[in-house]
Amino acid sequence: MLPVKQAEEIILGLVQPMDPVEDQEQVELLSARGRVLAESVVGTLDFPHWDNSAMDGYAVRYEDVAEVRGDRPLQLEIIEEIPAGKPPQKTIDKGQAARIFTGSMMPPGADTVTIQEDTQRQGDRVEILSAPSQRGEWVRYQGSFYQSGTPLLSPGIVLSAPDIAVLATAQITQVPVYRRCKIAILSTGDELVAPGQPLKPGQLVDSNQYALAAAVTAAGGEPLLMGIVGDQPEALQKAIAHALTVADIVLSTGGVSVGDYDYVEQILTQLKGTIHIKKVGIRPGKPLTVASFPREASTSSVLYFGLPGNPVSALVTFWRFVQPAMRKFAGWKQGWEPQFLTARSQQELRGGGPREIYLWGKIHCIDGIYQFEPAGGSHSSGNLINLAQTTALAVIPVGVSRIAPGDPIQVLAIDG
Ligand code: AMP
Ligand code: MG
């Protein structure tokens, strides 16, 4: 039984990220949020695009107004009004100013903006009431935020709303991103029926395929639903062999315990997979099988996760092990490892035993402090009902038997 951290290291060590060229696709800017940038983006426009005003006011020459004081105001002639979006037509000379608005282009000759509040308008003249603190005050210079030709965004970042703003302003409407990784999902078990099918005595609804498809989508992958396969070795072997040809990562649930009908491990060996992990010291989720298969015409391999059948175990092991592997595979430059937060437990939590324990519940931020509220009812791996609305998993390390209310605890936040 491998400790959790060691299993994580083995799994992440097996993952070879996608190829930034071969696995690249172009998406429309509006579809790029959440996608992983595949190559460095370089803009062809300076930002700001030209010298412009940061405020509403008057474009002036610094030397004209440098000596102005409240008791010695200065009148300037307004020779032009420059609305946003219109280039200035005139050059500002000694004794002249232009009415200017936020974002408007600075007119030639002017080098400073006096804000409206420091002026008094008198027809086609303006009285300047105070001197700017320096030349260039309230001017945003061309290229002062970004110079064209230099890297704007680097590969391996997950694009978010501000990145979309940056891409839009750089006029990059087609964005080079990694393709979504394909995750095949299959459920094993003679007892399973698809949701919506009549249930005979002893049968169970296959929730895992749906739960995992949702989790895969939330993690940025493309789920490929491979259906339910009964506990027949031949059918299972065929289904797994097929899944391995269409996906980057294959997830199965069930059939990895030590029961008489648990065939997955034996099939993986028959299919010439290398088995790296058979059991992990995690509760829930101990019977986790991880294997790799060489991929045709490639140096990378297809990863196989045989997740436990218990619905809670399946999701917990997905969040703890599969999601980080997906992120690394998807081209994330960094941060693919699970990110733990420190929270205070709202209730007493019980630990013990040889495995690291993951308790599901909710995370709240109260007065700036994270708090963990364990799910009500039993933390049984077969109880998927109280898994609803889970936003965090709290970790009780091996060797810790009790967490008192208010004690700090490491928490894995679940997104999506
Ligand atoms: P197994 O690992 O196949 O022994 O399954 C462990 C438990 O999880 C059994 O109670 C199964 O009925 C249940 N289970 C297995 N697969 C699924 C599934 N796809 N959806 C919901 N429950 C499942
Ligand atoms: Mg089973």
Image (cartoon, rainbow, N blue to C red):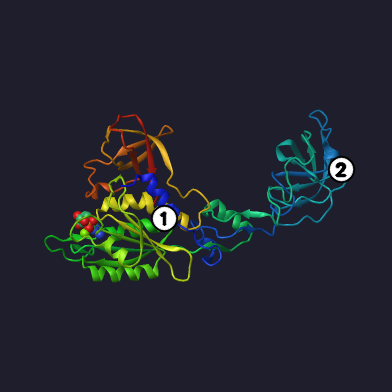
Q: Amino acid at mark 2?
A: Gly
Tell me the residue that label 2 is attached to. Answer: 95
Looking at marks 1 and 2 on the same chain, the residue that comes earlier in the sequence is marked by: 2
Q: Please, what secondary structure does the residue beneath circle 2 have?
A: loop
Q: Is residue 91 above or below residue 18?
A: above
Image position, residue 244 (x, y; %)? 37, 67
> What residue lies at 43% left-to-right and 67% top-to-bottom?
295
Q: Amino acid at mark 1?
A: Ala
Tell me the residue that label 1 is attached to. Answer: 219
Position of 288 compared to 103: left or right? left
Instruction: Name the residue nearer the viewer: 331 or 13.
Output: 13
Task: Find residue 37 and report its image quarter.
Answer: bottom right
> What residue lies at 82% left-to-right and 40% top-to-bottom?
62
Task: Find residue 213 and report its image quarter.
Answer: bottom left
Image position, residue 218 (x, y; %)? 40, 55
Residue at the right extreme of this rendering:
94
Instruction: Name the residue nearer the viewer: 242 or 142.
Output: 242
Instruction: Name the residue nearer the viewer: 201 or 76.
Output: 201
Image position, residue 307 (x, y; %)? 30, 56
> What residue lies at 43% left-to-right and 58% top-to-bottom?
220
Q: Is residue 141 above or below residue 43?
A: above
Instruction: Name the residue nearer the viewer: 137 or 129.
Output: 137
Position of 5 compared to 119: left or right? left
Cβ of mark 1 under 8 Å from ligand 1: the answer is no
Image position, residue 344 (x, y; %)? 36, 33
> What residue lies at 27% left-to-right and 54% top-to-bottom?
308
